[in-house]
Image: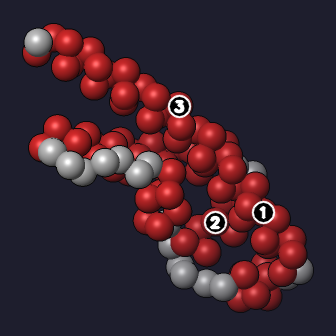
Amino acid sequence: MAGFIEDIFAAPTSDDCDVNYKSISRQAIKEVLPIIINRDLTERQRECIEKRYYECKTQSEIAEELMLSQPTVSRHIKTAQEIIKNRLCYCDAALEYAEKIILNALN
């Protein structure tokens, strides 16, 4: 799942502030991601995304295990990714806003 998440949050790493922001963003994602997966995905989407990214199974393996077609598994994964990206964008916006507040308070 790390590669999928990296595509969502590509924070710059040019100075200490940016490195710290990236670290905080990753920790926030680690906290929020399970909530999104459990609350916002259907049971099939959740099964497919967990088997694909946590168990490193191919779409064909998932399809066989869940007795679905490979295109159906692909569709469940794609839809789940879109939902996760959408929800995590809100988290990123909140983190950026918090960072601005902190930086303003320090200046």
* Residue at disc 3, secondary structure: helix
Q: Which residue is mark 3?
A: 90
Q: Can residue 65 be seen from the camera position used here?
A: no
Where in the figure is residue 1, as x and y percent of width and height? 49, 66
* Residue located 75% across and 55% down the image: 79
Label 1's element? helix
Marks 3 and 1, how far apart at CA: 22 Å
How many residues crowd mark 2 within 10 Å: few (<14), some (14–19), many (20+)?
many
Residue 16: x and y, percent? 12, 43
Element on which disc 2 rests = helix
Q: Which residue is at 41% across, 51% downward?
A: 10
Would you place residue 10 above or below residue 2 in this image?
Answer: above
Which sits in the foreground, 60 or 97? 97
Q: Are marks 1 and 2 in contact (CB under 8 Å)?
A: yes
Please report whichever mark, 1 or 2, sits nearer to the chain's N-terminal start: 2
Quadrant the C terminus occupies? top left
- x, y (%) of residue 102? 20, 19
From the viewer's perspective, tell me whether residue 72 is left or right of residue 23. Answer: right
Estimate how packed mark 3 is, as few (under 14), some (14 to 19) or many (20 or more) residues with alpha carbons within 10 Å. few
Residue type, numbered disc 1: His
Q: Earlier in the sequence, mark 3 or mark 2?
A: 2
The residue labelled by disc 2 is 49
Type of residue at label 3? Tyr
Of 104 and 32, the residue lying toward us: 104
Residue 32, which numbered label?
none
Q: Residue 87, can we see it?
A: yes
Residue 76: assigned label: 1
Across and down, in percent, residue 39 comes to 62, 42
Q: Please state which amino acid type lies under the numbered disc 2.
A: Ile
Disc 1/disc 2 C-alpha distance (Å): 8 Å
